[in-house]
Image: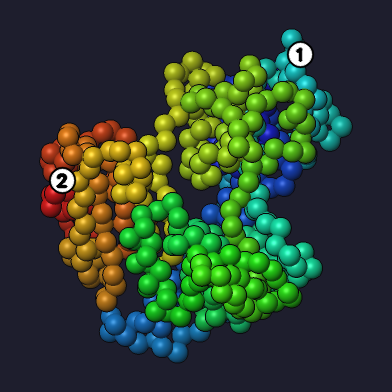
Amino acid sequence: MIDLAIIGGGPAGYVAAERAGAKGLKVVLFEKRELGGVCLNEGCIPTKTLLYSAKIYDTAIHGDKYGVFAKDATFDFGKIVDRKSRVVRRLVAGVGAKMKAHGVQVVKGQAMIEGRSSEGIKISCNGESFLAANLLVCTGSEAFVPPIPGLKEAGDIILTNREILALKEQPESLVIIGGGVIGMEFASFYNSLGTKVTVVEMLPEILGGLDKELSAMLRGIYAKRGVEFNLSCKVTKIDGNVVTYVDAEGGEHTVSGDKILVSVGRRPVTAGFGLESLGVEMNRGGIKVDNKMRTNVPGVYAAGDVTGFSLLAHTASREGEVVVNNLTGREDSMRYDAIPGVVYTNPEISGVGLTEQSAKEKGIAYKVATLPMAYAGRFVAENEGGNGVCKVLVGEKYGEVLGVHMLGNPSSEMIYGACMAIEAEMTVKELEEVVFPHPTVSEIFKETVFSL
């Protein structure tokens, strides 16, 4: 009898498997493609590898601002892509090594849930049957491709996050449908390399879930770099490489590109592995769970994108940990008040907790302070002519940190401190007593809090 069967080897699945194996549970992990899931193979890691190459190139050609002259710097697109693939292979192998080290049985293939009885949950894969006391479903999400007329007929001109990572040649022009995280990161990468990038977004602003003021500032930075933004615009049809869209006033426009990236969101993967045999309750297209990641079926859990709630790799990993902790006797529950969001453009934009908009919608009284990143000496030293902002929201009554939002490098490496402050319900007074290292860009967090 298997203690825990896990379907899906992404951030939720492999982290849960590692934790469970380390605690002595007998674990089997099913993965039909490669360990690491979309995040490691088609998302987080490959895109950040590409973006880092673009950032190095950006730094080189603008090195004169720092007294370093390398304007003749060039890049090899093929080698950038090859390095991305090497990084992914290395990290996939690393996940495999972790599974082996903790005694996790990895089965490569499409797992099928056969049903649940008094004996346990029956799963089959590659002609072999498995019986498990508990099941964790971590099947992730897939790119949502809207039913736009002409999209299917456009063939390989149309890309999702998967296909664009497999490109061997740089397109001269790229139309991106959707100005969310995926769209903006690819806009950043290709803009840096000289591709003509056009973004068509249905909402009034890019990066809808982040702070609107900072999102607008980031858009302004990229507009100056040549990215064309068409906001409040709905795509109505695609004819070959030509995208037709309608603006807020009803005016019709067209834009063409060598490639068209469709990045309008993702949806949970809940079909194709027998989930219906268990009678699991669904919610908005995802698996419904409680704060311990339990479904309505005893012994059946779900974590990660398949729940349709917080489609982020770090959320998925934590949810997997919650499952294993409760299975092994440690009381634990999932909290979502301090889940960070990061967009790895150049500059980066990061946020955690409430935005001004969400605070107003919830009727929460707050105070807000905003400071330019230039208040931190390290930022000025390393970002010549760069813009940046730190915004902090605190509760009006108690002064507790409610939200922190940053535009500027390296905000992705600093936002965790804000996550800890929100998780611990730290107040302005308590943060003022924390000693930050000097000189670091992270000091901007304390300086912003002090200005309240």
Look at the picture and state if 100 lies above or below 255.
above
- Relative to 234, residue 78 above or below: below
Is residue 58 or residue 116 the one in the foreground?
116
Side of 26 relative to 149 (left or right): left
Residue 305, given in percent of the width and then of the height, sits at 58, 41
Q: Is residue 67 left or right of residue 30?
A: left
Q: Is residue 438 visible?
A: yes
Tell me the crowding category of disc 2: few under 14, some 14 to 19, or many 20 or more residues within 10 angstroms, Cα based: few
Quarter of the figure with the N terminus: top right
Q: Which mark is residue 117?
A: 1
Q: Mark 2 is on which residue type? A: Val
- Quadrant hosting residue 241: bottom right
The circle on residue 422 is none
Q: Name the spot of residue 361 as percent of width and height, x first.
A: 35, 42
Q: Earlier in the sequence, mark 1 or mark 2?
A: 1
| Element carrying mark 2 | loop
**CA separation, marks 1 and 2?**
56 Å
Q: Name the residue rendered at 77%, 31% in the picture.
A: 274
User: 151 or 87: which is nearer to us?
Assistant: 151
Return the x and y of residue 420 as percentages of the image width and height. 31, 39
Q: Quadrant of residue 255?
A: bottom right
Q: Which residue is mark 2?
A: 435
Q: Is residue 261 visible?
A: no
- Residue at figure coordinates x 30%, y 38% from the top left: 363
In this rendering, is residue 362 above or below 118? below
Q: Where does residue 185 sit, x and y in percent of width and height?
A: 50, 64
